[in-house]
Image (tube, rainbow, N blue to C red):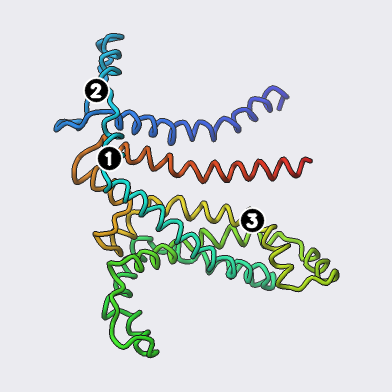
Amino acid sequence: MSAGDQQRGGRLTVALPYLWLLAFFLVPFVIVLRISVSETVIAQPPYLPVLDWSQGLSGFYDFASALTLETYRLLASDTIYLLSYFKSVQVAALSTLMLLALGFPMAYAMARAPRRLQPMLVLMVILPFWTSFLIRIYAWINILQRDGLLNDVLMALGLISQPAAWLASDTAIYIGVVYSYLPFMVLPLYAALEKQDESLLEAAADLGCPRWRAFWLVTVPLAMRGVFAGCLLCFIPVVGEFVIPDLLGSSESLMIGQTLWTEFFGNKDWPLASALAVVLLMVLVVPLMIYERLQQRELDGARR
């Protein structure tokens, strides 16, 4: 193979991810953004204006002049949408903290386990993915019912005297989210912890550092990349979660995913639903920008 062929192959390899993002992210986002500045009508499609290419440049001017930001003004003025965003961010933030509190000890134990057992432990973490996500959430409906397994176990242990109402509550949402997204937290943490050099801990011990202090001063800082990756992998999808709050939560605690579904399929208000999706994307871009900034600082510090 000539040098020119190798260079063209290298360019194609680099271009493919960008083409993928262009086709399956940027183009759909532009379509949603275009619908979000339209006007809701009872028609097919359920929004105006519609660009008519046969009218040429004048048709494009008419189309552009008819676009409106009214849907975004409605989002800012109606508390139901603001509360949906707040509820989604609240559930995602608290769930991510719970996942980190559970996932870090699990990942740490997996990374410190004998080498021959680590593949089996990783397999046990990803084993729930072999079952349909929807089936697993439906299973939690039976577990959390008043006559379900959870109440039976708690009553048998004497922790409660009568069945508790777990289902259709925020508690059920947190249980479902933590159960469903725990592997997304454990695996990045395990990848970061498994690569750490244990001689650093031995050096800290030789210098008189207690084990608990060496853990906070050596292990945790070196695992921060896995912590950030796991938090992003959990926080971002939980903000837009629909299935778990719809099946396990109550109608009084609507998250933004449920609001989006209602506007699209219930109210047939595509412009408003599209505006909700655009604002949601902007909310999710913030933690990505923070992570990117931290990564850049880390690279700059390493170069210095």
What is the distance, in whole Å, between disc 1 and disc 2 at their CAs? 27 Å
Q: Residue at x 26, y 12 (%)?
A: 59
- The numbered disc on residue 137 is none
Q: Name the kind of residue labelled 2 in the image.
A: Val
Q: Name the kind of residue labelled 1 in the image.
A: Ser
Residue for badge 3: 224
Locate residue 136 relative to residue 287 in the image: left or right.
left
Residue 13 at x, y = what percent? 60, 33
Q: Nearer the viewer, residue 199 or 86?
A: 86
What is the distance, in whole Å, between disc 3 and disc 1 at their CAs? 39 Å
Q: Nearer the viewer, residue 94 or 167?
A: 94
Q: Nearer the viewer, residue 109 or 219?
A: 219
Residue 285 at x, y = what percent? 48, 41
* Mark 3: few/some/many CA within 10 Å (<14, 14-19, 20+): some
Q: Disc 2 vs disc 3: Cβ atoms closer than 8 Å?
A: no
Residue for badge 1: 77
Instruction: Kindly indicate the quadrant of the structure image that contains residue 215.
Output: bottom right
SS for dot 2: loop
Instruction: Kindly indicate the quadrant of the structure image that contains residue 106.
Output: bottom right
Label 3 vs 1, first from the N-terminus = 1
Q: Residue at x 50, y 31 (%)?
A: 19
Locate residue 112 relative to residue 268 in the image: left or right.
right
Q: Residue at x 44, y 65 (%)?
A: 178
Q: Disc 3 vs disc 1: Cβ atoms closer than 8 Å?
A: no
Locate residue 253 relative to residue 111 in the image: left or right.
left
